[in-house]
Structures are given as C-alpha cells and as structure tokens.
Amino acid sequence: MNVSGAPAENFDSRLRVPEPPGKALHTAVRDGLFAPLALVCGGLFLVLSLGSGATDVWFAWTVANPLTAITMGAGFGAAFVLFVLAALEPGWTNARIAGFAPLVLAAGGLLATNLYDGDLNPSRDVDVAGISVDVPVAGLWQLVLGLALVLTVLTLPAQLTRRADNDLDSRARTAPMPVWARVIAGIEGIGLLSAGVVFFARPEEFGSWWPWPVSVLDLRELSVLMVTVGVLILQATAEGDLRRAAVGLAALVAFAVLALIGVLFYAGDLRWESTSAWIFVAVVAVLLGTGAVGLLLLGLLRLVLPVLIAVTGAEPDTPPSTARLRELARGVRSKITPHADHGFFGPGSVTWQVWSYPTSLSVGFQRAVVVEELDPGLVASVDATRAIRTRPRTRYDRTLRYFAMVAFAGTRQTMKAADVLVKVHSVGIGIEPGSGEPYDANDPESQLWIHLTAWHSILYAYEKYGPGKLSPEEEARYWADCATAAELQTCDPADVPRDRDGVRAYFERMRPQLVGSEVARSTMDHLLHAEVMLPPIPPVHWPATLVVTTALRVATIASMPRWMRDMAGIRQSRLLDALIVPVMRLSFRLIRISRWAQLGALHLLSPSTTPVAAPILLGVPPATPEALTPAQARERYGFPQPAQAHLELRAKQRERVFSDRREPSDIGLVESEPLLGTRTR
C-alpha cells in the first residue's frame, strides 16, 4: 500500500538535523576551526593512547607515568568527539559550547609548557620512504597549540558578528535542563575549575597528592584538562538547555569511558592505598554519570515526551520540560483515547499477536514497501508523484498508519480511511514507461499484490526475528484474517491464499510479471535506508541511529529470497544473513520488554501510527468491546465495497489522464489528512 503524499521542492537527505535557530554555523568556524582541531585532537589521542609507554619518542616531553598519557589522550579523544559533533551542527546555538574550549585548552597548554624549566624532548629522525626527516616533537606541540589559538581568534569573530539567518528564537530552550541538574552540574564545574587552578598554580606542593607519579609539567597539563572540562560544564549550566549542551555531554561520556579504560589498563600504577586514587575514580565516574544522565534526559524530552503527547492528545505547542514529562506520564493509560471498538480482529486474534510484535511495523513493513516496488505499475505510480523521494517520511508514515488502522483501529474510522484511500489512489494512474501499458493504483491485481506483500512480510519478519513460526491452526487464522482485511481493498478477498503453500504459489505466479528496472532498483535501495524515514536528528545521536538503521537494512535484505535480490541488484553475503538473525531476535525481545520503548521506536518511524497502536500495546480497552466484520461495518456505517466506491471520480481521473493528457486531480488527498496524517511533514 502506498498512500500518496504531496510533492515537494527539496529532497530529503538520509540524515537530517533540525533547522537551527538564529545563526547558522559559519563556514569559517566549521572548516577553519572545528575540522582542523578534530584532526589534531584525533592524532594526539592516538599518539598518547597507543604510545602511552613511548612518550620519550613521540611526544613533546617524557611523562612520568603512562597513566598521565592515557588520561591526556582521553581528554584529546573527548575533544575529537566535541569538535566533530560541533562541526556537524548546522547552527551556532548548539555548537557554541565547543567554540571557546580551544582558547582554554591551547592557552593553558602553552602556558604550562612555557613555565616548565626542564628539558623537552629533542627532535626525532623519522625515516619516510628512505628519507630521514627531522621531526621537532616539542616544537610541533607548541606549534599546534599556538595554531589552535590563532584559528580561534581568527574565526570566532566571523561567527559572533554574523546576522541571524532566520526568525527562530535562538534563546528558546527546546530541552530545558532541570534545576537540580543545573545545580549539580554547577557544583561539578566549579569544583573542577577550582581544583585545576590550584593544581596548576602549586604543582610542586600538590604533586605528591596525585594518585600516580607525575612531574610538574604532567600535573599542569592535567590541570589544564580539568579547567577545560570545568569551563565546559559551567557553560552548559549557564545555557540551561540539554540540546545546546548535547555535544559537550557526549564528549564527557567519551572522556570518562576512555579514562576508565586507562585506569583498568594501568590499575597497578595507581596508589590504591591513598584517598586520592578513589577520589579520581569517583570524579571520572561522576563525569560519566553527568554526561550519560544528561543525554538520557535529552532523549526523554526529545523522544519520550512526543510519544506521550501523541498518545494522550495533549497540546503539542506547550514548552517541553521534565515537569511536563512527569505530568503526562502520571496515569497515562487513563489519558489515552480508546478506540471505538475492537476493530475487525480484536484481542486473542492472531493478527493482534503478530502485528503488535515489534518486528512487524519495523523490519516487516520495511520489507513490504521494498519488495512491492518490483511491480512495474506500482513503482511507476510511486515515481510519478516523486513523494517517496521528496517526502519519504510522510509517505511512509501515512502508509504505515493505514495498515495499523486495519489491524487495530475502530471499525468506523478504518472504513472511512479505506473509502478515502480509493479517492487517494485515483491519482495513481498513468502509462508505465517500460511496457507502455496503463496502470491504476486501484486495479484489483495491484491491490492484491500490495496487500499480500504486506501481510506476508509482516508474518515472515515475526517468524524470522520474533517468537518463531505459528502453529498450523494459528497460521490458518492469520490468512483468514488477511482475507478479511482484503475486503477493505479493491481486490477480491476470494483471491487471497489461505495457507503458506498458496502464498508461495502466488509469488511464483507473480514472478514473471516483476521487473527489476532501474527505477525499481533505485527506489528499493532508497527505502532500504531507514534513515530517510526518520525526523531530523541531532548529530550526537547519529552514530546510534546509523547502527540501528544499518541493522534494519541488513535484516530486511536477509529476509528477501535470492531471486528477488538478484532482480533488484541487491548484494549481501550469506554470513551477514546468518549473523543478523540472533542480533535482531535479541534486540526485538529487549524492546518488547517495555511497551513504551516499542512505542518510542514506532514514533520515530511513524508518529501518526503511535496513537493507533498505543491502546493495543498498553491494554487500553475500547469504548465498545465488540469486533465487526467488514460486511457488518459497511451495513452499519453505509460505506460501499471499495471496488464499487467513487466510480465516477475514477472515470473522470482516467479521462483527464488518458484522454486530456493532463495530470490527475489531487482530490481526496486533503480529505485524507485527518485520517492518515499530514502530507507536508
């Protein structure tokens, strides 16, 4: 099923960020400051981490203990994360937490080096392609720090003097930091800043207190790191917004994890009998907790709060806060709007059992929309509107909502949606370029292909990545339900197979009619990237997002037969096919533990489907505990059979396209929005 959406001007990229409020990030800052600093910090991280025991060769001075090198390396590793994520931000508001860090880090490092009255490491001869190159490691260190200062001074004024690029309020807090979190973060920041200043000023006096042996220069450089982290935390506290602090929070997590790995690796070098060793470990653990809790709160406000708003029907424009999150979460089941009745299947049905499992509306549905593109007429209709390219998220959302309504929603609402869908599909007519034959989205054969592809894919994903195969009796009930659902389409329910062998025979009959055209291959590859279905996502969440969407792609391909992959030009090894199965089974079982986690994942893919599935997943009883057949619903609500619905409109559309050679009217699309969701998101 492909519920049409409106065409748009701009193409979605695979991963997008929300539109930045106020000033966009200046190219000079992104390319002239953050990018080179990320490269430098990444290099220093590798030098200090991998070469922690060889600082006499590869670093500006010989550190007294490898733990110093590891800890400094953790700092530069965190800085790498900070600058990379900041460079990915489109706006200054969410990147500026990284803008002033180079001043503190570079100026402090230069000052510490210049105050040192000992000897720095001499130049080293490095053999490059048989040529001996003299590398002044100490001078290179000072050059890098000086360059960081110069770049900061040269680029930041361009950013600070830039005019706002839009009318969005850059002062508005989209993910406000709770007061208690700001207080705790403020104490942490002040503590680190104060301790760093004291250690920097009196390294000889406090060196013996440090939890492992350090030189004066070692301690001063570690103090610079403490001051930098303290300033970042205080800046985040002043911002008071978790979204603006997100790149800094991710950097905190990176630093703490890397530092703790260093502690584990060089545990024997710490003076565990001293209090300072335990204080150091505790401080690093607190920093880890600060970053992790901050990102968790951001996730709750950006992911969970929208789910609560969707399922409760709360006012979406109210400013977000943790207080509102708690308010909506309190007694949430009583706030969810129930369905009018059990729909066409109801509790205890195999349809609810299969379709409510997290495999169904993720891998199962992705498989369905990918496989169906092999039908020449269908992909021609899809390509003609360009909506799958210009608005993939909207089209996917509307299509998924319709299928979820058929499975879960009340009968009146679903009958109305099915009736309107005939109008929507009246737009999907034209000439298929490959064969020159006409196509019609309301054609019974086309509708049967879409319907069976969806129901088969949902079941196949459930069995492959979920609880396993249905019993023969359950499978018979499932295909009977499939035939029932077909009564809401223009196809003939009598053509729906009633068992697995019948479904296999159907796909074999369809196989000669399927075509892996260039358009089909391109569209299938596009839809296999679930990133295009997602909303704009902050760069701090991109790594996790890519892991999940890649897993979905691999799992979807692994569920497709070889002949279908060959036709679509899709390549994936048998090893990947085998490895993804236990990964996805475990992942879906974990998601299934929390219905809220399942709703959150669904909301990311299809926000308008969330209120349809929520009453079922959360066990909210309907207003009337009854299930109807489609025939009973038609009689009660006065809807015609889909095959006989809107015949006059469909005839006018055919005349408009095939006789008048004009584009079809978009009538029905506006009418569909209250039922299937907006076409413009």
Image: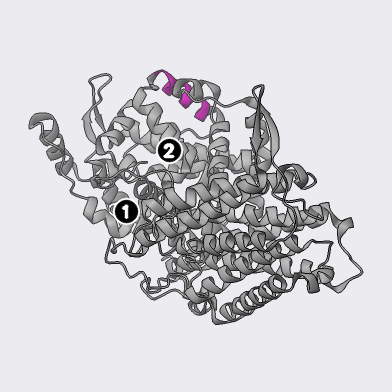
Most foreground residue, 78 or 181:
78
Q: Residue at x 33, y 62 (%)?
A: 23
The residue to which callout 1 is attached is 417
Q: Where residue 284 sits in the image (x, y, percent)?
A: 72, 66
Q: Residue at x 48, y 68 (%)?
A: 305
* Badge 2 element: helix
The residue to which callout 2 is attached is 527
Q: Residue at x 25, y 47 (%)?
A: 6
Relative to residue 329, is residue 488 depicted above or below?
Answer: above
* Badge 1 element: helix
Give amino acid for label 1.
Ala
Which quarter shows the C terminus?
bottom left
Relative to residue 581, is residue 311 depicted above or below?
Answer: below
Residue at the farthest left position: 660
Relative to residue 483, is residue 156 depicted above or below?
Answer: below
Relative placement, left or right, of 471 versus 352 is: right
Most foreground residue, 492 or 262:
262
Q: Earlier in the sequence, mark 2 or mark 1?
A: 1
Which quarter shows the N terminus?
top left
- Please give the range of residues in magenta: 503-512
Most foreground residue, 27 or 186:
27
Most foreground residue, 384 or 501:
384
